[in-house]
Image (spheres, coloured by chain):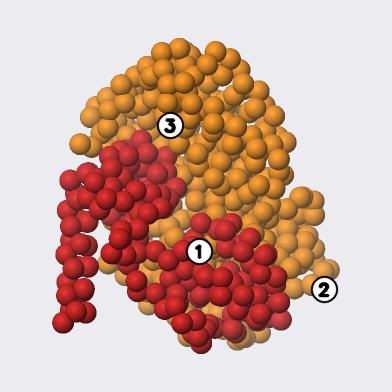
Chain colours: A red, B orange
Amino acid sequence: MNVNTKHDFKPFNVDLWKHDGQAGALIPLLQSAQDTYGYISEAAIDHISHITGVPAAEIYGVVTFYAQFRTKPLGKYVIKVCNGTACHVNNAKPIADAVTDELGITYDETTDDGDFSMLSVACVGCCSLAPVVVINDETYGRLTPAKTRKVLREYKREAKKTQQEKDA
Amino acid sequence: MFYSPVITNGSEAAASDKLHLFKYVEDSEQYKLMTFESHGGYKAWKKVLTEMQPQQVIDEVKNSGLRGRGGAGFPTGMKWGFVPKDSSKPRYLCCNADESEPGTCKDRVLMERDPHGVIEGMAIGAYAIGCHTMFIYIRGEFNHCIDRMEQAVEEAYAKGHLGKNIHGSGYDLDMIVHTGGGAYICGEETALLNSLEGERGMSRIRPPFPAIEGLYACPTIVNNVESLAAVPHIINRGAEWYRTLGTEKSAGTKLFSLSGHVKRPGNYEVELGFSLKKLLYDPAYGGGILGDKKLKGVIPGGASTPFLTPEMIDVNLDYESLTAVGSMLGSGAVIVFDEDTCIVWVIQKLIQFFKHESCGKCTPCREGTGWLKQIIDRIEAGGGQPGDIEKIEEICGNILGRTICPLGDAAVMPIQSSIRLWREEWQYHIEHGKCMVKTEFPFK
């Protein structure tokens, strides 16, 4: 898995914590942790608690409140299937089924090789492109099951290529 | 390059003397400061700094009749006027860009394609209330908007539109781009402020209202992206001009996000008071229902507003007219359902969403949405029991108006209206264990 587990915490921007003398930037600090490690580990929570003086339990409360934060590592490609109202009525379920069929994972699961994770999200704000799937930062709209498979196969090829380059 | 290929009526707006928010939305360079300035950008900001007193700005916006575009429709100028003039505390302006109401995708387009327009509107608002640090709270999922906005802020600083002693006026203004963590509730202003302070996004009891005690207990104004984006145009062309747009009580233009079963889903800027029927069927807008099917219903203002039936769509899109037919203008997200859509199936998705997004602070909403989800899941799965509808109605009645923030109301209003309008369909689902209509998907 492509996750740094050493936890040296150097990339953390501690300055984020100070803003106009107001302690308020817990969320940017957590985002920075997640950007660095791919998820928020217990060690990261402890470290942030140490910097900020906010109790670890409270930070855990914040982490689990927001949809963005993950306490488990995810795959290299994160597939977010939109299940907002507009996508729902425009065929989101067959799209999700196509992902499951193609990759063998369902919501909140990661493939064994650590390449793909599948998540359900409620509305990504591209309702006029429904149905929508977001893979990492790329948005794919007006999908059909066939188009979804095509996109996924491209990602699979890419993943395979990176793996081969790594092996070589 | 556009990040998202959303259909807009930008070409119509470009040729129009009235439409202004989307005037340059189809110009792929508009996000750059140079292009923005060549289109008259930051002119209003300079005018405000050199020629106007804060009170004059507030009065101008008040006279324009601009109302909040985030959903509640509260007059923007009046809100600004609530900030105490004699307070020694710092004041804050926060632009609410946590657009997460299902169906709403208008602010995203503004931020991606015209970020400086938003900054200019925010700066003018900040000046009006005497604020020197302003925030924009952008939804975490909107990566492209965040990139664009950060880039635009950097450009604005470099050109002296933000920073210290702006354009020699002696006025200082800083801007911070804050990325949200992903929670629907943070679109509610007090929850947004809690989130900005680094806490869980739970709403606060009002009063005190944020204008008196908001961020860090200082006077704070929270405005929607679209409301602020309209402000520079009001300053440039005057309140009188703005009043000529729209209707008497709903002045100006509004962005509508059209989605669901229509041929041309997209974002359209129209004057308030525009006909909903025209928005759905006119070839320049929605272009009719997908597959030329019949219309079953419309949600006119985002997932939390009551449904309209085909008999009710002869309505004008403004705050008063929609209230008169029992719905709301909300955020302007028009979601369309064709005749083959099972209403229970739609509501099931909605209640799943609201249950997940309930912040958990107020018991009626936290528990009630969970109960509703259990019952509706069961009905959809074919296990409906006699008395279920009455039970749903009772729970809804116990949530409505009994929570701190409007999320509780938002969760139950579409359910109540769906039962009111399509009761026999719910009944059929419970009795026969299946949908009354055959749900057919538009794309195969």
Residue drawn at point x = 71 percent, y = 40 percent: B363
Image: A23 above or below B65: below
Closest to the observer, B444 or A111: A111
Is the N terminus of chain B in the top left, top right, bottom left or bottom right quadrant? bottom left
Q: Are marks 1 and 3 in contact (CB under 8 Å)?
A: no
User: To which quarter of the image does residue B164 belong?
Assistant: bottom right
For marks 1 and 2, give the CA distance: 42 Å
User: Does any portion of residue B234 appear in the rendered image?
Assistant: no
For marks 3 and 2, give the CA distance: 50 Å
Residue drawn at point x = 71 percent, y = 81 percent: A21
In the structure shown, which secondary structural element does the residue marked by tag 1 occupy? loop
In the structure shown, which secondary structural element does the residue marked by tag 3 occupy? helix
Tag 2 residue: B88
Mark 3 / mark 2, whichever is N-terminal? 2
In this image, B142 relative to B190: left or right? Answer: left
Tag 1 residue: A71
Tag 3 residue: B346
For marks 1 and 3, give the CA distance: 31 Å
Please state which amino acid type lies under the numbered disc 2: Ser
